[in-house]
Amino acid sequence: MAKLLALSILMPFFINASLTSTNHVRVAILAILIIIVWRIILRMARAYVRLLKTDALKFLRNDDGLMLDCTDEELLEAITQSALRRGNITLQKATSNIKPKMSTGTSFYHANSSSGDSFESNNSSFNEHNATLLRKPQQMMQQVGGVSSHKKPVLTMEPHYILKPLRLTHLHQETSHHDYNGAKDGVKDKTKVYRGVREIAFYEALAFASRLSHLIASCMEPDSNSLSTEGRSIGYILSCHYNIFRPSASSFPDAYTSNGGIWSIVKRVKDLCTSADVWNRLAFLVAHYAGDEAVMSAFKSYIDTCTTLATTMISLNKISDFSPDYYGVVDLQNFNTNEHLQTTTASLSHPHLILGNITSNFRHPNIIDIKMGTQAYEPAAPESKQRREIQKYTKQEEFGLRIVGMRVYDKVTDDYICKGKSFGTSLMTKDQVIGALQMFFCLDGDSSKTVCPSEIDGIMRKLTHIKDWFENSNSEIAFYAGSILIVYEGNATSSTSSERPAVKMIDFAHVCRKQGGDEGYLKGINTLLDMLHDIRNTMP
């Protein structure tokens, strides 16, 4: 290839009969230089395409492995900082009594918001009157799952948020006693080490998928999992690589800010011209269009990886409808200041995940937390951990679910009946589990408290949508130790009785990649649907 290129360039010189001996020497030197340059271009192009493939493969973890490279401290820091920026925007809008939608423009894959919601431009002082509402988050009285004496409680924040406590562990803290199973056996449980940042990363991925799904979907073949001709274009693939796989290496962080102006464009051009990466990309383009087999073969492998990632993004976007609204992370230590904007992940003292309060639209919410799946532990968990989880509820594998807790409004006493973990683990037969669900729907006694059949129908429809996602769209993700939260109005005569029941997937700290999807979670959904169907058949 190099010889043909050199020959085509030098041909006009050879057919010129007037060439002198000096000219022949010059032509020879020029040919040698061209060959050398071409070899350098090939070397750069092949190195760059290997980099593309390596970076992309980082996002395709091994089977039963983490979906996040927890050894990459820079990536973990970028994820957490993105979540903090998102949380800051949420707090500022909350103080203005504006309910923010999921801010997809501040994903950790981009240094700043493409929509103009950059935290720098919104760094104004809080409204003092409204900030008072944010100074005292209260313990969530409706919490039914994750309640324990050694765990921090979930908090509520006006007007419609919950604050879920997080434990963020870093590489230098990996030997902390918190990462062990305590005095139980002294065995280190590595599945606990990064569960805080893993849950943040999953919610950030949902936000990222929501923003990119329309772009990725437009580059996929209809009814196919392959990239279209447009999707396979060099420019699109390189753009994806530049903006997705190497966020920390972005050389134009200020290009899209709302207040960057002409200087941000100048800075972008300057950075691009002085970046070694741009020359590697140009070398790759030249080698690819010249037909270098090594480059084209490696690039095909990269495209296959991109296709897998694209389908994952589309799949994650579909699950957004089944998960709570996500608003970022806040450090309660610096709750009413702007100090958390400059803090590092390691210095966070009381980090909390900001989620939408699923119960906020209900006057008397009836709530049940059901842990889904045939196993409540990751495959990488120590054997001692696995044994303990199995012993907690020996019917988990058979049913594919376990009732963690529930809270049911009693109209007569104007109070709540609460059931905890011990109640759920005592249900050893299918009839007992059905009986517990009947209690949740007030079907175990006074008919005046009985739930409206349409509530159960609505819950079953939403569970069926989740089931369809697991059957048709999920082929690589397992939600170990995840739960489904069901909420409906407990007082049918209240002014909010028309509020539709809510069914949400929660707890994403132990999400892993698993080829074939999550059959255990799917089994739990089928079991729950069968039980609700049996209950519904007993009603008029």
Image (cartoon, rainbow, N blue to C red):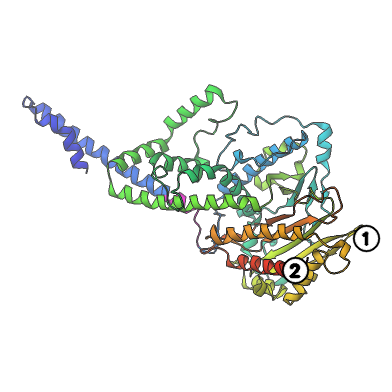
- Quadrant in which the N terminus appears: top left
Front in this rendered view, residue 20 or 308:
308
Name the kind of residue labelled 2 in the image. Ile
Residue range in magenta is: 53-62
Name the kind of residue labelled 1 in the image. Val
As drawn, the residue found furthest toward the right would be: 413
Separation (CA) of disc 1 from disc 2:
23 Å
Q: Which residue is mark 1?
A: 412
Name the secondary structure under disc 1: loop
Q: Is residue 38 magenta?
A: no
Can residue 240 be spotted in the picture? Answer: yes
Of callouts 1 and 2, the N-terminal one = 1
Q: What residue is at 65 percent from the left and 31 percent from the top?
A: 120
Name the secondary structure under disc 2: helix
Q: How many marks?
A: 2
Q: Which mark is residue 535?
A: 2
Q: What residue is at 74 percent from the left and 54 percent from the top?
A: 501
Q: Is residue 59 magenta?
A: yes
